[in-house]
Image (spheres, grey):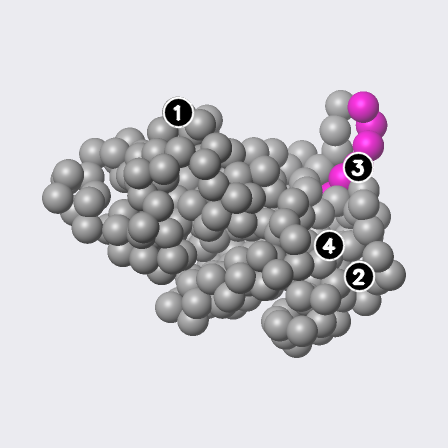
Amino acid sequence: MIELQEVYKKYRNGVTAINGIDVRINQGEFVYVVGPSGAGKSTFIKMMYREEVPSSGTISMNGVNLAKLKMSKVPIFRRNLGVVFQDFKLLPSKTVYENVAFALEVIEAQPKFIKKRVMEVLDLVNLKHKARMLPTELSGGEQQRVSIARSIVNSPKVVIADEPTGNLDPETSWEIMNIFEEINTRGTTIVMATHNREIVNTIKHRVIAIEGGKIVRDEQRGDYGYEN
């Protein structure tokens, strides 16, 4: 499903963020990516949704080599990928419904299908009753749930989540994790970068730890392993 082979990433300022990573993530897995600040986690995650390109090596996702993917093809690739950010990245002038529907409108889905599918995913994240509200009228947790709904409305095989609970209080973070668990049980691969020690140690999944741009630990049902 996702495979990185001999991947290196060196920035123009001379910093080597990723220093020879080899890893395979299979369809349906739930993987936490952990490590101290500056370890290379963000670069690792960004390369998976083609925000960053490796300096060398190959990154394959759904049979596509992202290292050689032309910029013009990136939007098409991302249609089969969901991305959830720490800061939500919602369109402020659009309603909850419109934010989620937008992901289907850009691929020119039929209006009837859009309405049905958007309401399905809003129901999954328990926001059906707030479909007509604007992001500014929602709490942080609700905004993140909209972001998740938007990320899965295209039924992607993979969802990449970059610190999705980073701006949320503990109770809301658990609610968000329950949604990710439900998405995963339906067969979607989840790759989540996180600093949340309690979540990683409580909801057990595979843990990939990155330090100095290298994978230093890869454990099934692993622990967080760092002091916050």
Which kind of residue does numbered mark 4 sit on? His
Residue 205: percent from left, percent from top: 61, 71
Residue 89 visible in image: yes
Dot placed on the residue nearer the N-terminal end, 1 or 3? 3
Write down the quadrant of residue 135 in the picture: top left
Pointer 3 local density, CA inside 10 Å: few below 14, some 14–19, many at least 20:
some
Write down the quadrant of residue 91 in the picture: top left
Pointer 2 local density, CA inside 10 Å: few below 14, some 14–19, many at least 20:
few
Measured in 3D between alpha carbons, the distance from the residue under mark 1 to the one under mark 2, in whole angstroms, is 43 Å
Residue beneath disc 2 = 216
Residue beneath disc 3 = 16
Residue at image point 62% right, 72% down: 203
Contact (Cβ within 8 Å) of mark 4 with mark 1:
no
Dot placed on the residue nearer the N-terminal end, 2 or 4? 4
Residue beneath disc 4 = 195
Dot placed on the residue nearer the N-terminal end, 1 or 2? 1
Q: Secondary structure at mark 3?
A: strand
Contact (Cβ within 8 Å) of mark 3 with mark 4:
no
Which label sits in the foreground, 1 or 3?
1
Residue at image point 39% right, 44% down: 150
Queried whether the magenta region covers residue 67, the answer comes back as: no
Residue 161 located left or right of residue 77: right
Which kind of residue does numbered mark 1 sit on? Ser
Residue beneath disc 1 = 93
